[in-house]
Every structure is written in structure tokens, then in C-alpha cells.
Image (spheres, rainbow, N blue to C red):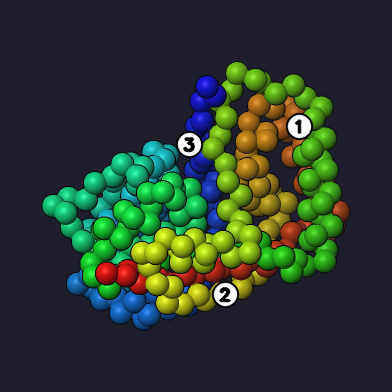
């Protein structure tokens, strides 16, 4: 059986440096639409390096964060040393147990809920929520409405990567990285929430933001994605350096940056008692 390693192992620092935070309007909408107040306890699933955690902690909310990856959790813990109302448990959500059978007003998951076992996650969230409590899920993905110049650059980058991956011997003994591209087809996330029979979808809200990254930043973006990192995990250092140089030269010769539109999608669901 092939050993599957944690998806962000070895790339947690890059992830934290280069990945975007969430639109402030999205955070404000969550607070308003779930009637969240400072007396409520919040559970966060898949807190990662604390992108969303810090946004809520800055506003004074009490958060019990759960994160599977030890490297991600170490960054999160360091960030939250000054937020005394944030606690952290390093564990898979499927195995995690609440202290004293605590019930939460809101459970949220940012960019992480798709990693969880769908046969467990909705049932367990339902059990952990107070009556009429909220399950709040949000993700971002690159928009299908790509900037014209960006689409061409990305296609050429894919060609460069595929050339190196196919031309060099991959170290077969290296464990495989768990990966998931995070994309949802035909709004399967909405369908999944409704199919659980445990939650009523109250509202779905979308936001769009534009980002720009220079060549070095864009390489970090690529390496922060498990699906990309898994492609090059077994490449030797010389191959990686040559591949990176070709990608940088491509970007620099095409305006010096890669622009992208990001779609953030927020799902607010209420527990059905």
C-alpha cells in the first residue's frame, strides 16, 4: 500500500506566505448572517496556517481550531500567541472529540471541507452544533473568466512542467502526497449540503478579487498547491531549478506578472433539528 503524506507537508511556509486571505466583506457577512456575537464559541475545521482564524480572532471571537498538519499548525500557533481566546487541537476532524460535549453556535471551514470524509463530516458537525446553529463553508478558486494574457501564460507553464515531469525519472520510493484540486463541478458543494438532510442552505454568496504575482511569487503560488507539488516531488534539484528558470523567463517575457481573478464562494447552512 502506498503511503499517503499530508498534502501540505513541506510547503506550509510557502502556503502561508503566498496564499490570499479572505475578503473582509465575506467575514463581515458571516458575522451578520449567523448573528454571531462575542459570547458564542466557534469551531474551525482545517484551520491551516490561520488565514481565516486570524480574521475572526482579531475581532475578539473565541475559536477552537482543528488542524491535521503539524507544519501548518505550528505556523497557526505562532500567529495566535496574542489571541488568548484561540485554542488549537492537532488532529483529524474525523477523530477529534469535543471537551465536555461542548456545542457550538457556528462551525466553519475555509478551503478545507472537501478533504474530509463525507460519510462523517456532516453528521459530526450536526452533532456538535447547538439547535439552529450554523455550518459555514467557503472556498476560493481561479475564475473561469481568466484574463486573456494569463490564460496563454498558464498554458505555456503547463507545457514546461509536463516536459520536465515526463523527461526525468521520478523517485518511485517517495510517498505520494494527498491531493485535491479543490474544484467543484456543477455546484456539487450545494448539492452535498442539501443531500446530507441535516442542514438547510440559507444563503450562497460569491465574491471576486483580482490578484497579480511576479515570476518568483507565481512560482510560490504553484508550489503551495498540493496537486502541483505532487507532480514535482520526485524531481531532482537540478531539474527543479531548470524548470523554475524556464517558468520565470516565460513570465518575465510576457509582462512580468501573472494576473488572476479569484472567485470566493460562501455557503451558510443552518442545522435542521
Image disc number at residue 6? 3
Vertical comparison of 64 with 29: above or below: above
Which quadrant would the C terminus be assigned to in this image?
A: bottom left
Vertical comparison of 12 with 32: above or below: above
State how far apart marks 1 and 2 are (Cα): 35 Å
Question: Quick check: 69 left or right of 169?
Answer: left
Mark 3, Cα crowd under 10 Å, few <14 / some 14-19 / many 20+, is: some
- Mark 1 or 2, nearer chain start: 1
Mark 2, Cα crowd under 10 Å, few <14 / some 14-19 / many 20+, is: some
Q: Secondary structure at mark 3?
A: loop
Image disc number at residue 207? 2
169 or 78: nearer the viewer: 169
Question: Quick check: 178 left or right of 47?
Answer: right
Question: Which residue is located at x 79 percent, y 45 percent?
Answer: 158
Q: Which residue is mark 1?
A: 165
Which corner quadrant of the image does residue 272 belong to?
bottom left
104 or 76: nearer the viewer: 104
Amino acid at each position: 500500500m502506498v503511503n499517503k503524506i499530508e498534502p501540505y507537508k513541506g510547503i506550509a511556509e510557502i502556503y502561508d506566505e503566498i496564499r490570499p486571505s479572505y475578503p473582509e466583506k465575506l467575514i463581515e457577512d458571516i458575522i451578520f448572517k449567523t448573528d454571531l456575537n462575542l459570547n458564542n464559541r466557534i469551531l474551525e475545521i482545517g484551520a491551516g496556517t490561520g488565514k481565516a482564524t486570524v480574521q475572526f480572532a482579531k475581532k475578539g471571537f473565541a475559536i477552537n481550531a482543528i488542524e491535521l498538519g503539524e507544519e501548518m499548525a505550528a505556523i497557526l500557533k505562532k500567529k495566535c500567541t496574542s489571541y488568548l481566546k484561540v485554542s488549537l487541537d492537532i488532529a483529524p476532524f474525523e477523530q477529534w472529540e469535543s471537551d465536555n460535549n461542548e456545542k457550538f453556535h457556528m462551525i466553519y471551514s475555509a478551503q478545507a471541507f472537501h478533504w474530509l470524509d463525507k460519510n462523517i463530516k456532516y453528521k459530526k458537525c450536526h452533532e456538535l452544533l447547538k439547535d439552529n446553529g450554523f455550518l459555514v463553508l467557503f472556498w476560493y478558486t481561479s475564475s473561469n473568466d481568466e484574463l486573456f494574457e494569463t490564460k496563454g501564460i498558464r498554458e505555456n507553464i503547463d507545457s514546461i512542467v509536463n516536459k520536465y515531469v515526463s523527461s526525468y525519472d521520478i523517485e518511485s520510493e517517495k510517498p505520494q502526497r494527498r491531493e485535491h484540486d479543490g474544484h467543484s463541478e456543477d455546484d456539487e458543494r450545494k448539492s452535498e449540503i442539501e443531500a446530507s438532510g441535516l442542514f438547510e442552505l440559507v444563503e450562497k454568496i460569491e465574491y471576486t478579487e483580482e490578484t497579480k504575482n511576479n515570476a518568483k511569487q507565481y512560482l510560490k503560488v504553484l508550489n503551495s498547491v498540493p496537486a502541483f507539488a505532487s507532480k514535482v516531488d520526485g524531481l531532482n534539484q537540478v531539474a527543479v531549478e531548470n524548470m523554475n528558470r524556464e517558468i520565470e523567463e516565460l513570465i518575465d517575457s510576457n509582462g512580468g506578472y501573472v494576473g488572476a481573478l479569484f472567485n470566493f464562494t460562501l455557503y451558510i447552512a443552518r442545522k435542521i433539528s
